[in-house]
Image (cartoon, rainbow, N blue to C red):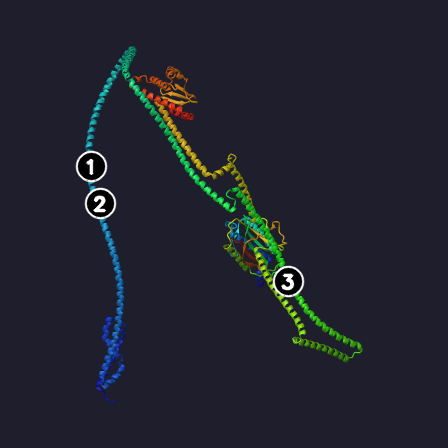
Amino acid sequence: MAGTQQDITNAITLKGSAQLVSEFFYFGINSILYQRGIYPPDSFTFKQQYGLTLYTTTDPAVKGFLDDILAQIKEWLEGGEVQRLVLVVANVDTKEVLERWDFMVQQEPGVTPQDTKEGKGGSKDLKLIQKEMRDVIRQITACVTFLPLLDCACSFDLQVYTHKDTQASEKWMESPPCFIANSQEVRLKSFSTSIQKVDTCVSYKMDD
Amino acid sequence: MDASPDPTMVFTDLKDLHMFLGSSRTSVNRPGWEARRLDFSAASRDSSTLSLPSPNASSLARGQKRHHDSLVGFDVTKKIREKDSEIINTRATVTRLQGRLHEVEVTHKKAKLEADAEIRTLQYRQRRDKELIDDLQCKLKKMLKGKEEGRESVKSARAQWDTANLEAGARVNKMQQTYLEESAKMQEKINDLQEQVTHLEEEVAEKTSKVTLAESHTEVLEARLVEVQEKHRRAEESQAQGEEQKRQLNQALSRVRDLELQQEGFKEAQKQQEVLEAAMFKLPSLEKELAKLKENNKFLRDTSRNTQLMEEKLTSALQQVNYLEKRCEDRASHQAKAEMYKESLDRFECIVEEEFGLGRRGTPEDLQGHLRQLRKGDQVLTDSLGQLRASYKSLEDGRNQEVVELNLLKTKLQKQEHMTQHQAGQNKRFNRRLLLVSKERDSLKGILNSYESEATINYSVVGQDRVRGLEGQVKLYRQEVERLNVELQEACSSTTSPAAAAAVSSQRMEDAKKITGLEEKVQSLEEQMGGIRQEKEVLELRLEHRALKGDYDPTKTKVLHFKDNPHARALENRKSQIEKLQTENESLQQRVRLLEQGETLNLTQRVGVRVAAESHKEVVELQEKVSRQERQNKRLMEAFQRKAREMREIVYRLTGYRVDSCGEKQYKLIHMYAESPDDYFLFEHTPAKEIQLLETEFSNTIDDLIDAYLRHENSYPAFLSAVTLDLFNRQTKYQAQSTSEEEEEEEEEEEEVDDRKGNKRGDQKGQKPDDDDDDDDDDDDDACVILD
């Protein structure tokens, strides 16, 4: 009995993994928005997550946008459609892309689609996964130290890289990839739910 | 030994016994000695006993020895030993005493140290006490001083008190005396008053008696009064008659007085006549003097007029100077501002010239146009850059595909080569096998032939045939071996046989060439492969890098984003804002243009407010100026009014005429001595600058004067003076008779005033008509003031 219970508690299904990853996206994106000062600090409230005090937006427009987009991303994650999620920070005046925060989602090699369909899951401890997520968010926070100052009116956009044949609702539209011409990339830590692996990377415009 | 003991021995034994007994006694005393050890005095007391015990302690052990000694006769040695023991004892005591002494010294030192410490503390205390004592003494002194002072003050106060007491006593005495005196006086007065009262009471009594008498008397008198009244009526009638007579008398007297006055007037006239006759003699000389004086007067008047003019001019000039100075200051500040603006403009122009190469004559519109062009160019460039990027991306993708194809082809090529080599080897093997198989076939054919030849099966024959076949085979093999040996030999003796060797060597050379060629090929291919691998790695790295940058395979993936994302919203907001601002800007520019053209009427109030905000400073300055000017004007007006009022008052008081303007260039003159306010003159100032007297009710009454002065002499001053005199005479009929000298003086004054008035008229004629208008207004204002 004890053994089976242990198995159940440690098992992570694809759905659970998608839930974890989308949750991570929510906090990661909020952290970036707060740390990079894209929205004023007084439009954020703090919340305990992953053993950290994280800031989440209270702006209804932003919150609604994130909720909508992450719900869809969660669905796609469950279907294994998402290849990467990109947060693009762009100058409003010049439309120039100043920063890209890439979250590259990969299926872990040992997990076959058959397994996931059958509801078999990984055996990674939830605490360990959350620790890895915490490390990534800490790194995101630390990135402020070397990223160039955003001294202009900026806004953000979220892009999802999906399979070519992914079905999307009318709210979605195809977008050109937002590249930074003269960019510097910094790889951050990655985390894995034992089903999906998320690599994080920030690229920013080099100062001329 | 001997039966009889030696007598000495007995003695010594006895002594020993004694000694033993003594030692036992002393040994009893020992603990006490131990206890008393610290007691110095006790120790010294016991010293006598202490010296003894130690020899006694060993007495038992030594008894026998002594016994022997005594037997031998060694008394001396015994004594010596005793002495020694004594010495030892004494030494021990000495050491003990020294120890004690040391202890005592130590204790002494301790005691001393303690004592020293105590002494120090005591000294310290003493010092403190001394200080305390000093302080207390000082305080005591101060207290004593204070006490003495207090005593002195008390003494002085007492002395003062005493004196005051004495004075007070004296005063009290005085007061008592005065009081006594006063009381005595009062008493006397009271007595007097009482006497008076009594007296008055008596009088009252008398009076009452008199009153009674008088009452009776009045009754009598009343009766008489009636009679008297009757008499009085009669008397009144007679008095009225007398009064009428008196009136007649007074009238007669007044007539007499008039006549007397007339007589006096005649007499005075006579006197005047005489005086005038005397003066007539002096007249020519006086006339001369008069002429001179008149000239002088004229000159002085001219000069005074000139000075007045000059003063007016001076004041106006001063005002102008002040105004000009202010203007100068303003101009300096404006110039400074203008220079600053010029400098900034120059700088802007320089910048424009440097940056855009428009030249110094470039207008802002040019600059704007240039900027617009630059923006357009920028946009075009960014567009082209995007296109280039897209094309670059597609090219890169094509290249990648080509590289992949190239790799595939190379691997195919390698496989093909491999196959060819393999097949060549196989070919050889097949050839050999073919050979062997053909031989086997031959042998099998032989066997078959043998089968065919022999109908029956004979195993031995078959075996023999087989053996033969096998032998043939062996032969063949042998032949083959031989051939191979020959070949070997040939190969060995390739040098000996040049033709064969040459053939072999050529074959070998070919082989070697082939081999080397192949090796080279292999090497080159390997190199190529290495290069391609490196390239592949590089390309993989690049791919990864590009993936990091966000690149993706458009054939497999697509990029999706929410239509309603924050960036799009922000962009829209910005766009609408910019459009709004642009429209606003355009409207404002138009307004500015309108303003520059000077069309201020059509502008809305808002624009006016904005303009005011922009040129607020200027407006404030101008407002200040305006207010200053207004204030100045007000002050001038006030001063002018005051001056005019003064002037008119002076004129009124000197000439007796109040001049009011009524209507267009008409002046109303009312005289000080006019009998009614309706008595006035009306003068008109004609356009030909002549003065005309208009007809009024009053002017009709003085036709004679008009006739005399205006028709004949045509002199307004003389006419007015005559009127003045006439009115004056009428008003002061009675006073005129008082003195003739006063009249003369007045006449002189009037003449002067008339002259001045005439001059003033002249001035007025000289002045411009505008000034007259101003005066008119002022006069209107002043009319009421003077009437008050």
- Look at discs 1 and 3 and give the one toward the viewer: 3
Pinpoint residue B319: horizontal percent, then vertical percent.
39, 33
Question: What is the secondary structure assignment of the residue under circle 2?
Answer: helix
As drawn, A17 above or below B699: below
Pinpoint residue B590: horizontal percent, then vertical percent.
53, 38
* 3D distance between C-alphas at marks 3 and 2: 137 Å
Q: Residue furthest toward the bottom?
A: B2
Along the line of sight, the residue nearer the viewer: B162 or B515: B515
- The residue that disc 3 covers is B410
Question: What is the secondary structure assignment of the residue under circle 3?
Answer: helix
Residue flagged by tag 2: what amino acid is it?
Ser
- Look at discs 2 and 1 and give the one toward the viewer: 2
> Dot 3: within a 10 Å radius of its alpha carbon, few (fewer than 14), some, or many (20 or more) residues?
some
Which of disc 2 and disc 3 is earlier in sequence? 2
Which of disc 3 and disc 1 is earlier in sequence? 1
Image mark for residue B153: 2
Quadrant the C terminus of chain B occupies: top left
* 3D distance between C-alphas at marks 1 and 3: 154 Å
